[in-house]
Amino acid sequence: MMVFMSLFLFYMIGNSIQIFTIFITVGMVIPQARALFNIGETFRPFEDPRIKDQLTLYKLMYAALHILILAAAIYKFASMGLIPVRPIDWLTLVNYVQPHDISVTY
């Protein structure tokens, strides 16, 4: 349920650069990253040698859903222009060569 709520919230907050939009997006990134780093602790109460294969599948599904929300947050940052993903964002790194001669025809 949280995945759909997060994706809907990303849709509703828009792509404009405002402090609330950035706070909401960062507020969605931090818990997802924290959950990805704590997968072992989250599933520790369910560890049992008999269901280890099934538990691995559930861990992968859990991680995939959190990665989906992180990907949506990265897309949101890129659509706001906060992550340099377009070629125009890297234009300052391109060396501009001045032409030696200019010819003009009449």
Image: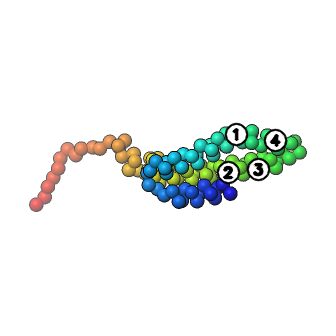
Pointer 1 or 3: first along the chain: 1
Identify residue for label 3.
58
Tell me, for residue 64, which label it has, or none: 2
Q: Is residue 47 left or right of residue 73?
A: right
Task: Evaluate if marks 2 and 3 touch, with contact meaning CB atoms under 8 Å apart.
Answer: no
| 15 relative to 97, above or below | below
Pointer 4 or 2: first along the chain: 4
Identify residue for label 4.
45
Mark 4 vs mark 2, CA separation in Å = 20 Å
Mark 2 vs mark 1, CA separation in Å = 14 Å
Query: What is the quadrant of the N terminus in the image?
Result: bottom right
Instruction: Please identify the residue farthest to the right as the structure is shown.
Output: 50
SS of the residue under disc 2: helix
* Badge 4: residue crowd in 10 Å (few <14, some 14–19, many ≥20): few
The amino acid type, in three-letter code, at marker 1 is: Asn
Toward which corner of the image does residue 47 lie, by quadrant?
top right
The amino acid type, in three-letter code, at marker 3 is: Tyr
SS of the residue under disc 4: helix
| Foreground label between 3 and 4 | 4
Pointer 2 or 3: first along the chain: 3
User: Residue sitting at 82 percent across and 44 percent down?
Assistant: 46
| Foreground label between 4 and 2 | 4
Identify residue for label 1.
38
The amino acid type, in three-letter code, at marker 4 is: Pro
Query: In the image, residue 65 lies at what x, y percent?
Result: 67, 52
Toward which corner of the image does residue 33 lie, by quadrant?
top right
Residue in the foreground of this view, choosing between 74 and 95: 74
Task: Evaluate if marks 3 and 4 touch, with contact meaning CB atoms under 8 Å apart.
Answer: no
The amino acid type, in three-letter code, at marker 2 is: Ala
